[in-house]
Amino acid sequence: MQSIALLTRLSHGMTRAEAEALGQNLTLSGYPAKVTYWFSSDQKLENFGASVVRREARCATAFKGLHDEAVSVLGSPTSTNREVGGKQCEDWTLSDSVLRICCRQIAPSDGGTGWMLLMAIKSFSPHKMIDITNGFH
C-alpha cells in the first residue's frame, strides 16, 4: 500500500494496537520510515508521524516522490513551497486532520556527504500542528 494512502486510514481515537498495526513497514518515498505516535492518556491516537534520515540522499528526489504520491491520493496541497525551519513543506487539509510533508537537506559539520530528513505528520488538531522544526526522528 502507498504510504500516503495508509496515512489517510489513521483516524483520531484509534487504539494503540490499531494505529501501530497500520504503521508497521511504512515507507516514505521508498525508504523505511521510523514511526512516532502520540496518544492521549486513555491510549487513543492523537497524532502520528513518520520520518526518514538518509546519508547521501537528496530532498529534491525524495520530496518530489512523496509529493507526487500525495497528489495522486489527496489532490493538490492546500499550501505549497512553505519554508518551515529551513525545510520545504506542503500541507493537505483533510476532513478530520492536516497532513504535512517536509524535507530538509542537512549539511554535515565534518565536510563529508550530506543527509536528508524527510517527514510526514498527521495532526488531528490542525490549530495545534506539531512543531516539526527540528524533526522528531
Image (cartoon, rainbow, N blue to C red):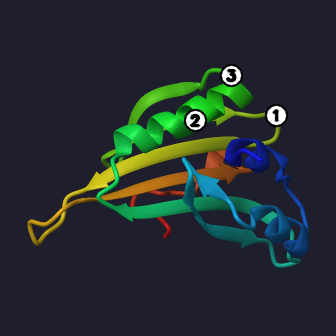
Rendering coords of residue 85 (x, y %)? 34, 50
- Where is residue 108? Give x, y as percent: 18, 65
Outermost residue toward the left?
Answer: 111
* Drawn side of residue 33 relative to residue 24, left or right: left
> Mark 3, residues whose alpha carbon is within 10 Å: few (<14), some, or many (≥20)?
few
Circle on res. 75? 3
Residue at 77% in and 72% down: 39
Residue tagged by mark 1? 95
Q: In the image, residue 64 lies at what x, y percent? A: 46, 34
Q: Counting residues from the N terminus, which is met first, the one under dot 3 or under dot 1?
A: 3
Q: Secondary structure at mark 3?
A: loop
Does residue 135 appear to the left or right of 22 in the view shown?
left
Residue at 19% in and 59% down:
107
Q: Quadrant of residue 82?
A: top left
Residue highlighted by disc 2: 91
Which amino acid type is shown beneath numbered disc 1?
Answer: Ser
Looking at the picture, does residue 136 appear above or below residue 61?
below
Residue 90 versus residue 7 in the image, above or below: above
Per the model, the C-alpha gap separating discs 2 and 3 is 11 Å
